[in-house]
Amino acid sequence: LAKQYTEQRESKRAIYDVDSLFASIDILEMANAVMPYSDKMCHWMARRNIATLTINKKKKGNVGIYIKQGIADPKITSFIEILTKYTSSL
């Protein structure tokens, strides 16, 4: 994982391949991420007070957006606004 992270960091793009949700959440403490997950995971996260952005009845999947607290990134804010607007119009 460390080698993969280093190689992708040099290309300015980080992609993580982690088989554990808890390890994924730990990684998210260090980074911003967009992470797809199933309805079952959506419910699991909701029970643990992890906010999720979901799509209405026409949904094909869910996407989790995790951002570091206290860091305002205009690109991420804009992406969240566009995604929220798009999904609310479906």
Image (spheres, helix red, strand yellow):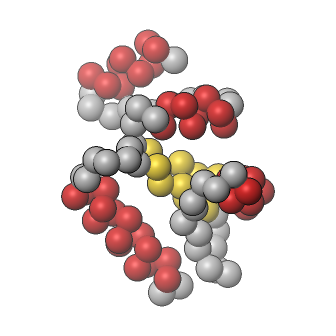
| Residue 61 spot, x, y in % from top left | 63, 63
Report the number of numbered marks. 0
Q: Residue furthest bottom?
A: 89
Q: Residue furthest left?
A: 74
Residue 74: image quadrant is: bottom left
Tell whether 48 sits left or right of 82: right
| Residue 79 spot, x, y in % from top left | 33, 63
Residue drawn at (38%, 47%), measured in percent from left and top? Answer: 69
Q: Is residue 85 visible?
A: yes
Q: Residue furthest top?
A: 3
Tell whether 76 sits left or right of 25: left
Question: Where 44 falls versus 27 (above or below)?
Answer: below
Residue drawn at (58%, 34%), measured in percent from left and top? Answer: 24
| Residue 62 spot, x, y in % from top left | 61, 62
| Residue 19 spot, x, y in % from top left | 67, 30
Q: Residue furthest right?
A: 40
Tell whether 36 sits left or right of 4: right
Residue drawn at (36%, 17%), measured in percent from left and top? Answer: 6
Q: Is residue 38 visible?
A: no
Residue drawn at (54%, 31%), measured in percent from left and top? Answer: 26
